[in-house]
Image: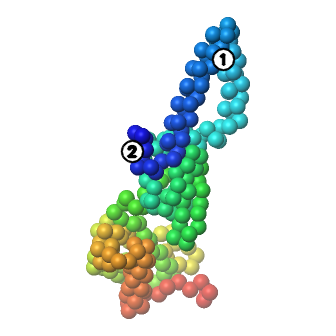
Amino acid sequence: PAIQKRSEGGSEAAETIFITLIQVFVWAIGLTFTLEVAGHNSTSIIAGLGIGGMAVAFAAQDFIGNIIGGLLLYVQRPFELGEKISVAGNEGVVKRLGLRSITLEDFSGKVTSLPNRLLVSETIENITSSHFTKEVISMKLDLSMSASKLKMAANNIFLIAKKNEFVHKDFTVKFGKMDEYSHNIIFDYYLDKGKLLGSAPSEELVELITRENTKLYVEIVKMFQKNEILFANKLAR
């Protein structure tokens, strides 16, 4: 009951692990007493079983790793059922916490099962609990443009970001690695999820984020066109 109250019925992995451990403990004590009452030396028998148990444990290390991973997830609690997370390139809402794995469902309805041991070794991003969402816009500019034009391009993006109410002040505009035909300009920024939801409470957050990213992209393109900042054209070279 205590486990169920803490997890609010959501951690099947934790409940199963604790119940299994308790059952093993009770059976171990019961068998030990039974062997002693029957006149056998329980110490030597248990020692023999221990050697065999080590071989079984080695063969089942993935299974054991997943169980331990489930227990660690329960203790650390980096996410809850119903929250959206991103881990090892997989993103979705947590639909199930199991003994050996968790189940994620993405926006399209695709369901992915991930082993618990993977979540222990990988970085987990709890998208639901975060206040901001990290976004990036990367554009390739013509290699022949002058330094003054490149500086203007960076300033254009800076001004657009400063005017946008949903872009957090901690954004960066930088140039990435130059390749054989273009300059790469990169706009890293965070969108305030609270403000986005406040602007349209009836709409889904993913739709609001997509709409704002599109708006920023179009504004940057319009500003570049106005100031004759050219995009790279690999086909023309």
- Residue at (47, 87) in percent of width and height: 230
In this picture, residue 25 sits left or right of residue 81? right
Q: Residues within 10 Å of mark 2 (few under 14, many from 20)?
A: few
Residue corresponding to mark 1: 46
Q: Residue 227, can we see it?
A: yes
SS at mark 2 in the image: helix
Lower position in the chain sequence, tag 2 or tag 1: 2
**Residue 5 numbered tag:** 2
Real-space CA distance between mark 2 and mark 1, rounded to the nearest whole angstrom = 37 Å
Residue at (46, 44) in percent of width and height: 74
Position of residue 210 measured from the top left corner of the image (x, y, whole percent)? 43, 77
Q: Amino acid at mark 2?
A: Lys
Residue 6 point in image, percent of width and height: 39, 44
Q: Nearer the viewer, mark 2 or mark 1?
A: 2
Left or right, residue 54 beside residue 112: right
- Residue type (three-letter) at the residue carrying disc 1: Ile
Res 216 label? none
The quadrant of the picture occupied by the N terminus is: top left
The percent position of residue 114, horizontal first and vertical second, equals: 59, 54
- Residue extending furthest top? 39
Look at the picture and state if 5 lies above or below 129.
Answer: above
Q: Is residue 188 left or right of residue 167?
A: right
136 lies left or right of 166: right
Quadrant for the C terminus in the image = bottom right
User: What kind of colouring is applied to the model shown?
Assistant: rainbow
89, above or below 53, in the image = below
* Most foreground residue, 151 or 210: 210
Few, some or many residues within 10 Å of mark 1 (<14, 14–19, 20+) = some
Residue sitting at 60 percent across and 56 percent down?
Answer: 113
User: In this orientation, which residue lies closer to the viewer: 202 or 162?
Assistant: 202
What is the quadrant of residue 214 in the picture? bottom left
Q: Is residue 148 visible?
A: no
